[in-house]
Image (spheres, rainbow, N blue to C red):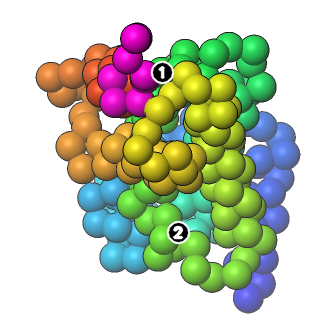
Amino acid sequence: MGSESDIAQRRALARANDDPEYRLRRAELIKTAAAVFRRKGFRAAKLQDIADEVGLDRASVYYYVSGKEDLYQDVVGEAVRDNVKMVEALRAEPQPAKRKLATLIQSLMESYERHYPYLYVFVQENMAHMEEDTPWNREMRGLTRRFDVAIRGIIQKGLDDGSLGFPIKDAKLIANGIIGMCTWSHRWYQPDGPWTAKEIGDTFSTMILQGLARSAR
């Protein structure tokens, strides 16, 4: 118990001092953890797997993180918060709903590229991982709700003003389809793949808007 307390104090002091070398090593751990979580899944991944890939013994890893859960939270937390800020800011902009929807889809795909593979780890682990009632999980569930509400708001505005049309005028249903289309890319998207995130976003937004935009009469 004393040894664990000592290393926790050392870890807290290193973070408080914001030592550049410590920060760099911790960032390397987070990046490695993201790759391991995506490959093996959070539950199957072991802290030793991450330690082996980054070239540290398991005991040394605890100087940088308190455990696997700490790494997971760092892997996905900032990326999720950034996406929520993005979509809420977009909803507040004085633009036509059609343009906002195109920007949203493009921005989502570019965010997946920018935060690769962190957001994909969140998508992969979201349902199973957030069942426990912890402060961090409650924050993530709240952010997910805000994300969904903002997207539905963009769509609802277009449905209300007639610029977007659909057989069933249900913003939730349409939002679920758009989110599902974008997040399913976690099964096949690679930063060095045949299409850039921008190309995918442009293609997806064209697919959606050709189906939603009313034809000129």
Mark before the other along the chain sequence, 1 or 2: 2
- Judge whether 85 appears above or below 146 on screen: above
Q: Where residue 67 sits in the image (x, y, percent)? A: 58, 70
Compare residues 91 and 85 and report the one nearer the observer: 91
> Which residue is drawn at the image coordinates 77% and 84% (left, top)?
2
Residue type pointed to by label 1: Ala
Q: Where residue 116 sits in the image (x, y, percent)? A: 41, 37
Q: Which residue bears the numbered disc 1?
A: 102
Which secondary structure, mark 2? helix
> Main SS type for the magenta part?
loop
Let me know if residue 66 is in the magenta part: no
Q: Which residue bears the numbered disc 2?
A: 68
Q: Could you tell whether 40 is left or right of 20 in the image?
A: left
Which secondary structure, mark 1? helix
| Residue 217, quarter of the rendered image | top left
| Residue 145, quarter of the rendered image | bottom right
